[in-house]
Image: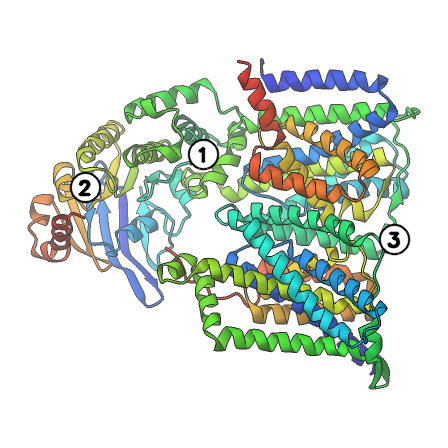
Amino acid sequence: METLITIVLDGLQYSSYLFIVSVGLTVIFGVMKILNVTHASFFTWGAYTAAFFIGKFSEMGWPDAFGFVIIFASAAVVGLVLGLLIERGLLRHMYERDEVLIVLATFGLFLMLEDLILLVFGVNPYFAYQPMALLESVEVGGITRDVYGLTLIGLAALVALACWYGQNRTKWGKLLIAVIYDREMSEAMGINVTVVYVVTFVIGAVLGALGGAYIAPTVSVTPGFGVDVIVLSFAVVVIGGMGSIPGALIGSILVGLLRALAVHKLPEIELFVVFAVMAIVLVFRPEGLFAPAKPRKI
Amino acid sequence: MTTTPILQVKNLQKSFGAVIAAKDICIDVSAGEVIGIIGANGAGKTTFVNMVTGYLKPSSGTIEFEGRDITGKPPRLVTQAGISRSFQVSQVFTTMTVYDNLLTALAIADSAGLNALLPIKRPELQQRCEETLARYHISEHRDSEASTLSQGVRKLLDIAMAMVSKPRILLLDEPTSGVSAEEKFDIMDIIMDALKADKVTVLFIEHDMEIIERYVSRVIAFYQGEVICDEPPEQALVDPKVREFVIGTEHHRETQGA
Amino acid sequence: MRDRTVIGLTLGLGICAIGGYFVPDWFMNQMMFGFARALAIIGLLVLWRTGLVSFGHALYFGLGAYTVALMDINLGVTDAFVRLAGAMLVTGIIGVLLGYILRNYRDIFFAMLSLAFSMVLYGILVKTEALGSTDGFPVSAPTFMGAAPEGKYYLFVLICVVGWVSAVLVHSYLQSTLGRLTTAVRDNEIRVEYLGYSVARAIHIKYVISAVLTGAAGALTAMALGQVDPDSMVNWTASGELVFVTILSGPGSVAAPFIGSLIFELLRTYASEWAPHAWQMIVGGTLLAVIFFLPGGLWSIAARALRGRK
């Protein structure tokens, strides 16, 4: 029973952080048809920025609770700055080009940003444990768990809710769906697609950065931090359907639980099982489990 | 003595969900005929061509070519059997020159077995390439990249490539659409001369009634997925149904300067 | 046959094979790794001409490398030729099988599915003790039909010869009808089908060719390196490296991969000495520069220079 709770909670925690990171990736793909490898950079930079400032402010004697403010602020700043720089600086010149070429360009940019981190933050790891230590731990069904990890689940739920609300209840959401469906038609109907692109990209960037920033207090932030996450996010996005937010949710939960199950019961298949599922989905349902309906074009 | 028609279409039907794109089409084509297919946009002409050439699978009905059933076979096999087509939007190899387009087509047509490993620049193919370029009057464009060609030249290239497999039936989908009024007849003359020399049975979709009058011996009119007329042009063009459902709209188009 | 490419390749073979005897060991090593990898790049070049980019070719690189390692450890095979043949057989079979699936995909889906397959292998290798897990295996020095020479010169010559044979074969392949079916398929699949040839079959054949070439690359690299491990040979970063060198070399000629790969190898060695924390930046920056300013890769510079001299 305890193992079951552990697996479920571990899985949900993992799913939560995957979801926060992946939802940005999938929306960017849905709207702009770009598989953005640089998304990993938002994650890494968010984590580094948060960890760095948590450490700094802690040194200066600020209360540990302020760490939470830093986390969200880091996510916002990193997402805004990096997002705008990348979209306006690079991507906007590439929209007409081959989609695979765009992926390669974002991959190149990702590599550059990875080394830039070393220049800015140095090679030593950062461990900003303060916010996590602050929340201590709690007993759940006989096992001790960090409250911090549980709040991650809560955060993911909030993000999911915000996405649902944004997509279904706001005018912005409708614009987004129109542009995902058909960019040309949307432009013809007067929608300022450029603005939609920029705003979408920045929101995606902020969410990616938030994933990194929020997870920073639980691990040692080192170079190469974002490399594994991005491939797993790809898997999530592919499984759920590129461009689908509910797909990212289901995909994250599936991948997270699968991983937790594997880690506890069959560690040998931990890595391979996620990609096996990704391959299976691609073979039998390439659009993903929840692909947004595409109108057939003549 | 009646000879077997080269192409027999029986009760051909195609529906996309609730939309019936083709309804109970029955057509017999004899070898050597030149047939014009007319009808307003959306009447089912291209759907018909798509089904005969294998791009679409009919919902029901049969298509027999030279006595063999080719219903539902993919384009690749239909071409190998002996039916070719040209496209409304010419399908060419965009980054290759006109010469390379044709050479590639000839090579693919001659790629059975180990031939596929032979160099593409071999004398037999190169010679046939020159001949074909000359026959379709596009030799002067041989070094132009296909994406830079004018509509008329693109169409000629498209048809030249379709003819590479030496088909017995050729279906042309609007061979003169997008071509300027002056060029239309020149292009059709080139095409029809080349096809006659190869003794090909021709069916072509056309909106321009002048072209229909000049080149065909039989007119098949489509309307809302059905054949509403199948007669020689003199009768077809005065048929009241054709006047109402086809020419009426054609005339309307032309007076509008479409 | 007065084919400029073949002449150039033969000259290159002569210069390298003989020169390799006299240059310092470290440079011969660079050439070994560079030319071995070039085989994989040639394979990716064929796919690229067909309009396909694989994000998972490290699958075959790793399969080739690990086949050599396992043949060594489990069967005691040390002969370089047998090892190479084994690697090519294994990658050929897997290429045929996976090709049945992948030949129906294009663009980003082809890229992602190939990535997924390669990561499945990575996942299996990393977590399986019997397969070396993250440490991998050492590979004993190769023998050559009984001869067990000192040093790596024999292996170097083998790599050069295999490189030459592959380049010449692929070069003539590209001039055949099947070879033309690369750009033809990329330009217009419908037209190819309507000319009577199966696009799926064309892609399948090219996929298998690229798989076998990449397997050979992995096998030769394993022998040159003396070891195999998943992170440098099977991980998605390894696939990324292969794609990078392909783009860097450009699709213009089968000779380009040798130069591009050697430059990459030299760059990597120097970068790790002088600017160890800027290597990724250099790769990333170069990739972006090539995509934006030199879409034909480094080879287009050479081609322009050669043309200018006429």
Residue plotted at (64% across, 68% down): A251
Q: Quadrant of the C terminus of chain A?
A: bottom left
Q: Is residue B95 above or below residue A284?
A: above
Q: Quadrant of the N terminus of chain A?
A: bottom right
Q: Disc 2 marks which amino acid?
A: Thr
**Residue beneath label 3, please?**
C130
Q: Is residue C209 visible?
A: no
**Circle 3 — which element?**
helix
Same-chain check, marks 2 and 1: yes
Q: Which mark is in front, 2 or 3?
A: 3
Same-chain check, marks 2 and 3: no
**Circle 1 — which element?**
loop
Chain of the residue that carries numbered disc 2 in the rendered image: B
Q: Are marks 3 and 1 in contact (CB under 8 Å)?
A: no
Residue B225's spot in the image, x, y percent?
Answer: 24, 58
Please give left or right for residue B37 compared with residue A103 in the image: left
Q: Disc 3 marks which amino acid?
A: Ala
Residue C77, image quadrant: top right
The numbered dot on residue C177 is: none
Question: Of residues A248 and A97, which is closer to you in this image?
Answer: A97
Residue plotted at (29% across, 38% down): B169
Mark 3 closeness class: few <14, some 14–19, many ≥20 residues within 10 Å: few
**Residue beneath label 2, please?**
B2
Residue C156, image quadrant: top right
Please give left or right for residue C300 compared with residue C77 in the image: left
Residue C137's spot in the image, x, y percent?
Answer: 88, 45
Please give left or right for residue C92 compared with residue C177 in the image: right
**Residue beneath label 1, please?**
B95
Q: CA distance from mark 3 to mark 1?
A: 50 Å
Chain of the residue that carries numbered disc 1 in the rendered image: B
